[in-house]
Image (tube, grey):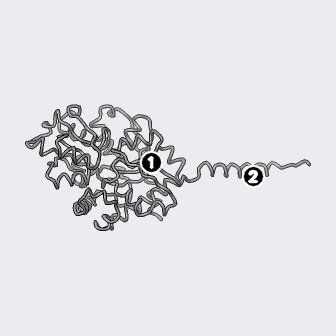
Amino acid sequence: MKFTINRRAAMAVAAALALSTGGLAHAAKDKVTIAVGGKALFYYLPLTIAEQKGYFKEEGIQVDVVDFAGGSKALQAVVGGSADVVSGAYEHTIKLQAKKQYFTAFVQQARAPQIVLAVSNKTLPNFKSFADLKGKKIGVTAPGSSTNMVASFVLDAEGVNPKDVSFIGVGAGSGAIAAMSTGQIDAISNLDPVISTLERDKAITVVVDTRKMEATRKVFGGDMPAGSLYAPESFIKENPETVQKLTNAMVKAAQWLQKATAEEVLKTVPESYTLGDPALYKATFNSLKEAMSPDGMISASGTETALKALKSYDAKMADVQIDLSRTYTNDFVKKALAR
């Protein structure tokens, strides 16, 4: 039997096939691995809230959060292909673009770095100026992480070459506290609850504090985007529905945190996050609340501040042309807020 098909019918069939195969190729990815450097830090609290409150599940997406010692280690996981998305410092998207690797931040968790540089009361009891740090060991979450960047930026601004100190990776939890308390390091660049715990124990003297918006603007000369979810540009283009679902959950977490009491937060996070002191955890949350993004939006002026900061302390970045519009987008957040 001989079948015939006219040209119009053939075109219709071809179009239908193209739509169906295209739909399969770009179907929403329902399982996502997020790499984070120091999950228990307040810096990443919105991620924990979205996970613990079930906001990702409500969006129909399964999220596996893998914790690393620092942001640079988390980033390596995504670059290496073992994770899809990074929960980390926004400025890494700029540093990556300088290497011709294009990553885009799509929702913000914090609008201030919350990073504190402090000196040891044990090994530097007579600290007077940043020059006293020459030849000393500074503990950071991991070499190359945002804690390392902020410490280097501050040192350079104070006339101390970052190469004149030793940066030691100490993580973002009990290991960092132990390293400082036992005198293994002379200074520390870290976040809460690590810093608040060391302050409680009178183990440190704070010299630079970016936990407050005013202090952040003083240090960097403007707003400074901090913790964000970012991913390879290609992942975002290929999985827009998935990225939207992640953003919806993160924005909901940010909004919940703006209304939540410290007691409600304490009941939501894993007990291990408190480092054995629930009362201190609650007090720290209250003092840090303004540093958290209220809606997930990334400040355009803040991205410019981040670029200036990177160029000022990293000589390799000085002459590099960066297209900031490719380092972040607010499109997904705007859709989440409009729901």
Sequence-first tag of 2 and 1:
2
Quadrant housing residue 248: bottom left
The image shows residue 295 at horizontal and vertical percentages of: 38, 60
Q: Which residue position holds label 2?
A: 12
Disc 2 on helix, strand or loop?
helix
Q: Which residue position holds label 1?
A: 85
* Residue density around tag 2, few if under 14, some if 14–19, many if 20 or more, within 10 Å: few
Disc 1 on helix, strand or loop?
strand
Which residue reaches farthest left? 126
Residue 228 versus residue 306: which sits nearer the camera? 228
Q: Residue at x 23, y 60 (%)?
A: 277
- Label 2 or label 1, whichever lies nearer to me, is 1
Amino acid on which disc 1 is placed: Val
The image shows residue 109 at horizontal and vertical percentages of: 36, 55
Q: Residue at x 75, y 51 (%)?
A: 13
Residue 76: numbered disc:
none
Residue 180 versus residue 313: which sits nearer the camera? 180
Instruction: Work out whether 21 lies above or below 258.
Output: above
Along the horizontal axis of the image, is 175 left or right of 335? left
